Amino acid sequence: MRKEARLAGSDWREARAASHATHAAVTAPAVRVTVLLSALADTAKATADGR
């Protein structure tokens, strides 16, 4: 979405903010799981990375 807006010459700052918020919403819980339950670290990272 950001890429399309940039290529079209549109203001893409709002799309960038939404992308960052989405990324944080996915990675923050994964970090918590990694810290609290280190045995699940690999699974949490793979999930956050979309694998």
Image (tube, rainbow, N blue to C red):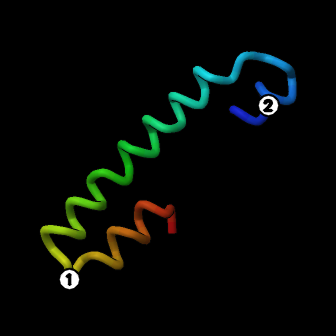
- How packed mark 1 is, by other alpha carbons closer than 10 Å (few <14, some 14-19, many 20 or more), is few
Residue farthest toward the left in the current orientation of the protein: 36
Residue drawn at x 13%, y 68% is 36
**As drawn, 42 above or below 18:** below
Q: Answer with left or right where residue 36 lies relative to residue 10.
A: left
Judged from the image, the secondary structure of the residue bearing numbered disc 1 is helix
x%, y% of residue 26?
38, 49
Q: Provide the residue designation for mark 2.
A: 4
Q: Provide the residue designation for mark 1.
A: 39
Residue farthest toward the top in the current orientation of the protein: 11
State the image quarter where residue 3 is shown: top right
Kind of residue at badge 1 = Ala
Residue 19 got which mark?
Answer: none
Residue drawn at x 62%, y 23% is 13
Q: Answer with left or right where residue 35 lies relative to residue 9.
A: left
Kind of residue at badge 2 = Glu
Q: Answer with left or right where residue 27 lies relative to residue 36.
A: right
- How packed mark 2 is, by other alpha carbons closer than 10 Å (few <14, some 14-19, many 20 or more), is few
Judged from the image, the secondary structure of the residue bearing numbered disc 2 is helix
Residue drawn at x 85%, y 20% is 9
**As drawn, 48 above or below 3:** below
Residue farthest toward the bottom in the current orientation of the protein: 39
State the image quarter where residue 10 is shown: top right
Q: Quadrant of the N terminus?
A: top right
x%, y% of residue 44?
33, 68
x%, y% of residue 6?
79, 28
